[in-house]
Image (cartoon, coloured by chain):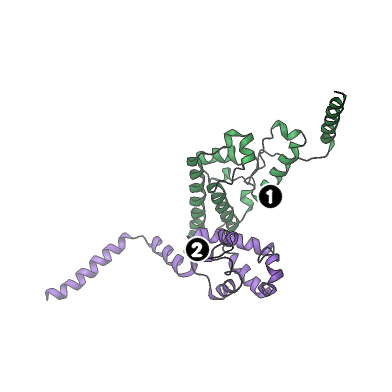
Chain colours: A green, B purple
Amino acid sequence: MKWGTYLLGLLVLLFLGLQLAPNELPEVHIYNSGDLIQSGLVNEDVAALLKTACYDCHSNETKYPWYAKVAPSSWLVAKDVREGREALNFSRWEELDLMQQLGKLDDVAIEVDEGRMPMDIYVKMHREAKLTDAQRELIVAWAEDTMDRLVEDSEAYEEEQD
Amino acid sequence: MKKLLLIPALALTVFLFLQATSKEAIETTIIAVEFDNEIPAHVKAVIDQKCYGCHNAESKNEKGKKKLDWDDFESSRRAKQLATMAKINETLIEGEMPPAKFLESKPEGKLSPEELQTLLDWSAGKKRAPKQ
């Protein structure tokens, strides 16, 4: 009994100690002038899907859950959001050049089609982010159509210049 | 005499049909076919020598094949090609290809500065139309 109490006390101390470790959650910005959805490339249905399934990690509009403020889960959340934004940040869409946008859209289509995104661990904690097959197809079709559209626009422009 | 009339009549018919196709559509197709879909020979030479070994349809290197398959590239639609080129460009700038591990056992696989430049120039692709 005594040992059990000690052990519990030790665990509580350890847990409290963990809270002191510095951990910086990436900053949240709600208004982003270069945002993808504001760029007019996304219809309402797809925009809603991107917001619920992608934007927590792939934008500056992260909605942090309560466990993002408690170590050690906060470390994982911080890491995933940081890495997610680094790989693709929809809030900074307009900063990408045409070629980069095409590359990112192609990645979106591939990752969503093959079921690698949204990540399993994220969906476990955010049931609303779970995509049905139809929703996946909608995102993939949108990404591929948008790629074609961007190329057509730029080609039309090039012809005007000739 | 009847036969002689047939030729201008036929020409006129063809001419009328051509009016139905918009000029814009014709120009776009020509540009896409003639200039865009093929890799220039000097670029292809580098690819064949330094990339194709792992990045082909029959490759035993599953990861390499999945990431990029040159046999698939030329038959892909234009937007897909450009997307692939963008990712190639990024990979080359980061110095991630050919992989360091591969070069340990095959140092002659390294891209020369000229070869790297050739691939970078080609994969830089096109610029976006400025916003109107």
- Looking at the picture, how far across and down is residue A76, in whole percent? 72, 41
Cβ atoms at labels 2 and 1 below 8 Å apart: no
Whether residue B131 is visible, yes or no, is no
Marking on residue A86: 1
Whether residue B17 is visible, yes or no, is yes
Using a 10 Å C-alpha cutoff, classify the residue at mark 2 as few (fewer than 14 neighbours), some (14 to 19) or many (20 or more): few
- Looking at the picture, how far across and down is residue A37, in whole percent? 57, 43
Which subunit holds the residue at mark 2? Answer: B
Marking on residue B72: 2
Residue that sits furthest to the top in the current view: A1
In the rendered image, which quarter is residue A38 located in? top right
The three-letter code of the residue at mark 1 reads Glu
In the rendered image, which quarter is residue B96 located in? bottom right
Q: Residue at x 50, y 66 (%)?
A: B71
- Above or below residue A140? Residue B21 is below
Marking on residue B25: none
Q: Residue at x 59, y 63 (%)?
A: B61
In the rendered image, which quarter is residue A40 located in? top right
The three-letter code of the residue at mark 2 reads Asp
